[in-house]
């Protein structure tokens, strides 16, 4: 009910059969688009200072510095991206662009609305993306949002697909070594003095993220990769369940994805 994994038999897949088939199809598509060998060798970024040597203080410059790292990781030139900031809790935008030109696409979202926006290219040939200022105080969610927006560039901006697909865009971050951030952002709990709650972000569910990362580890030949220690406990649980399913049902893996 609240996004936590349901208790299942340990060797069952953490997601439904229909979702498993969709996710495995999407996985094969992205392997083809971005290259299996390249995906196998790519560095995995983790929420450590060694990967993000930035002093996060809520300033816009920290987002710019983060964008440089994420863009480099996802093989997009930083100087080809224009980053803008906004204050509103954008829930839906139908037409127009703050840059005067470009194609609006609904992008990364959280419970309050859009966390980031992708606008396509402006008249100067730069990819325009926007980040809600509240993410400046949430560094890991900022990374996840920027990764999602650059995934739009990789898929739509570089003409790999013709029609926007938000779930496929989320999944793309896995192949560029940033899946930890987007997976952890999918479902988060928080509490303070006298209050507590939870929030969701993105388009894939917690369970879908867990299975996607278990597939990623599988093709990389990683049984117990160090990076799983940086997953939230719920995502890690779904990851382990996904691994158990893959290990005990190898004959089912990707079979239903081939017509």
Image: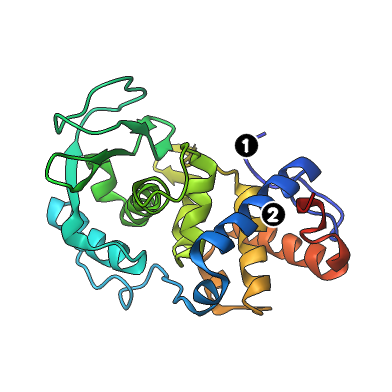
- Relative to 194, say whether 50 is above or below: below
- Relative to 174, say whether 42 is above or below: below
Residue placed at 79% from the left, 61% from the top? 253
- Relative to 26, say whether 53 is above or below: below
Residue placed at 32% from the left, 22% from the top? 93
Helix, strand or loop at label 2? It is helix
Residue placed at 27% from the left, 67% from the top? 69
Residue placed at 34% from the left, 52% from the top? 150
Task: Give coordinates of residue 180: x percent, y percent.
Answer: 49, 62
Q: Earlier in the sequence, mark 1 or mark 2?
A: 1
178 to the left or right of 116: right
Task: Give coordinates of residue 248: x percent, y percent.
Answer: 87, 68
Whether residue 36 is visible here, answered yes or no, is yes
Q: Badge 2 is on which residue? A: 24
Considering every residue shown, the one lying at the far top of the view is 94
**Image quadrant assignment for residue 239:** bottom right
What number of labels is visible?
A: 2
Task: Give coordinates of residue 86: x percent, y percent.
Answer: 19, 35
Which quadrant: the N terminus? top right
**Image quadrant assignment for residue 249:** bottom right
Q: Residues within 10 Å of mark 1 (few under 14, many from 20)?
A: few
**Tag in front: 1 or 2:** 2
Q: CA distance from mark 1 to mark 2?
A: 25 Å
Helix, strand or loop at label 1? It is loop
Comparing 6 with 89, the one in front is 89
Q: Badge 1 is on which residue? A: 2
């Amino acid at each position: 009910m609240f996004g936590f994994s349901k208790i299942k038999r340990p060797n069952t897949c953490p997601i439904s059969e229909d979702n498993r088939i969709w996710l495995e199809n999407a996985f094969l598509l992205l392997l083809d688009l971005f290259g299996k060998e390249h995906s196998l060798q790519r560095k995995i970024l983790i929420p450590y200072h060694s990967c993000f040597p930035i002093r996060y203080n809520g300033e816009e410059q920290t987002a710019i510095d983060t964008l440089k790292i994420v863009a480099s990781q996802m093989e997009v030139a930083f100087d080809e991206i224009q980053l803008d900031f906004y204050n509103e809790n954008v829930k839906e935008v139908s037409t127009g662009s703050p840059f005067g030109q470009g194609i609006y696409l609904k992008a990364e979202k959280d419970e309050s609305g859009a966390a980031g926006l992708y606008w396509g290219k402006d008249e100067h040939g730069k990819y325009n993306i926007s980040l809600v200022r509240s993410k400046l105080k949430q560094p890991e969610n900022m990374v996840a949002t920027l990764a999602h927006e650059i995934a739009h560039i990789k898929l739509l901006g570089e003409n790999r697909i013709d029609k926007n697909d938000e779930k496929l865009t989320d999944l793309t971050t896995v192949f560029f070594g940033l899946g930890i951030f987007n997976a952890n952002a999918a479902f988060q709990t928080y509490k303070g003095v006298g209050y507590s709650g939870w929030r969701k972000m993105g388009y894939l569910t917690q369970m879908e993220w867990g299975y996607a990362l278990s597939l990623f580890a599988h093709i990389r030949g990683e049984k117990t990769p160090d990076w799983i220690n940086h997953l939230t406990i719920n995502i890690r649980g779904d990851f382990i369940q996904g691994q158990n399913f893959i290990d005990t049902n190898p004959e089912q893996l990707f079979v239903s994805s081939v017509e």
